[in-house]
Image: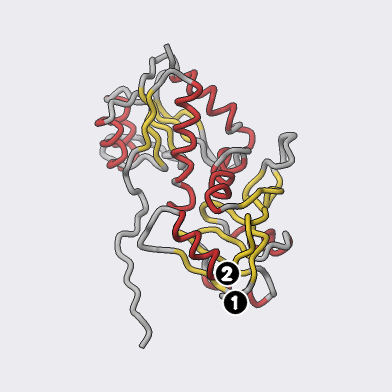
Amino acid sequence: MTTVADIRASLDRWYPPELAETWDRPGLVCGDPADPVGTVACALEATDAVVDAAIAAGAQMLVVHHPLLLRGVSSVAADTPKGRIVHRLIRSGIALMSAHTNADAAVGGVNDVLAEILGIRVTAPLERAAVGDNPLEGIGRVGELDEPLTLREFTARAAERLPVTVWGVRAAGDPDQTVRTVALCSGAGDALLADAASSGADVYLTSDLRHHPADEQLRAGGPALIDTAHWASESPWCRSVADRLAEAHDVTTTVLEVRTDPWTIGIRREEV
């Protein structure tokens, strides 16, 4: 019989908690470690719609990337948004666990899944982990494309291979420049713009880029930039962790087909 503790042990082995950033709060949020698990549901984050889908799937455990209780809270009362989710999970017998920046930094984690999808052979982390012995552990990745592409072509590849969002994929730089080396960071990565510039990469792919930091990096001669939707760059990991859990344990796993990207409308007015 597989238990919540067994699933937690595997997740902690693959995505060691010590690799998490100091501000992060990954781990088991609710659930009894001794409870049996027959079905594990995977999603990027625990929203009301995700909990609905987990209940419908008959899951006893929900594994997510984004921690539900990342910031300090003084109440999980059922009439608060996060408290409502905690109460629904407990009442439904569903344990909740997250693997966040520890899954970003770990080998085989979120960034490596993103690199594989984009055809990048990883050679180094973008920011080396402060702990651990594996030289590839850390936030972000740097690697070589499987073939040289123009910035326009590589941007099109990202749009074709990542989940579709209304945000789409946008790039800044010379559309015809050649891209061989790529720096990337799943999720919000503008804090690593300087690291991307010093890596020698031709382009830096990440999410949630802001106007002024991006413009300043380009003016300083930094790499071209590709900006994807946050959800699109991270959600492919859900399939990876589901497959790993199914292989390691006698459980059924399912990736919940719930789009948690918050953006629902994207309108682009064509130039005339």
Viewer-side residue, 79 vs 46: 46
Dividing the picture into quadrants, the one containing residue 87 is: top left
Task: Identify the amino acid type marked 1.
Answer: Asp
Task: Identify the amino acid type marked 2.
Answer: Leu
Give the residue drawn at x 34%, y 23%. 60
Is the residue marked by circle 2 packed among few (<14), some (14-19), or many (20+) residues within 10 Å?
Answer: many
Give the residue drawn at x 40%, y 35%. 42
Give the residue drawn at x 35%, y 35%. 76
Total numbered circles: 2
**In the rendered structure, which disc, 1 or 2, sits on the residue that comes first in sequence?**
2
The spot of residue 85 in percent (x, y) is: 31, 36
Q: Which residue is mark 2?
A: 151
**Would you say 172 lies left or right of 267 here?**
right
The spot of residue 47 in percent (x, y) is: 33, 42
Q: Is residue 143 above or below residue 66?
A: below
In the image as oriented, which residue stretches furthest toward the front? 147
**Would you say 195 lies left or right of 189 here?**
right
Q: Quadrant of the N terminus?
A: top left
Is the residue marked by circle 1 packed among few (<14), some (14-19), or many (20+) residues within 10 Å?
Answer: few
**Would you say 135 lies left or right of 255 here?**
right
Viewer-side residue, 4 vs 153: 153
Q: Which residue is mark 1?
A: 174
* Secondary element at tag 2: helix
Give the residue drawn at x 43%, y 37%. 64
* Residues at discs 1 and 2 in contact (Cβ within 8 Å): yes
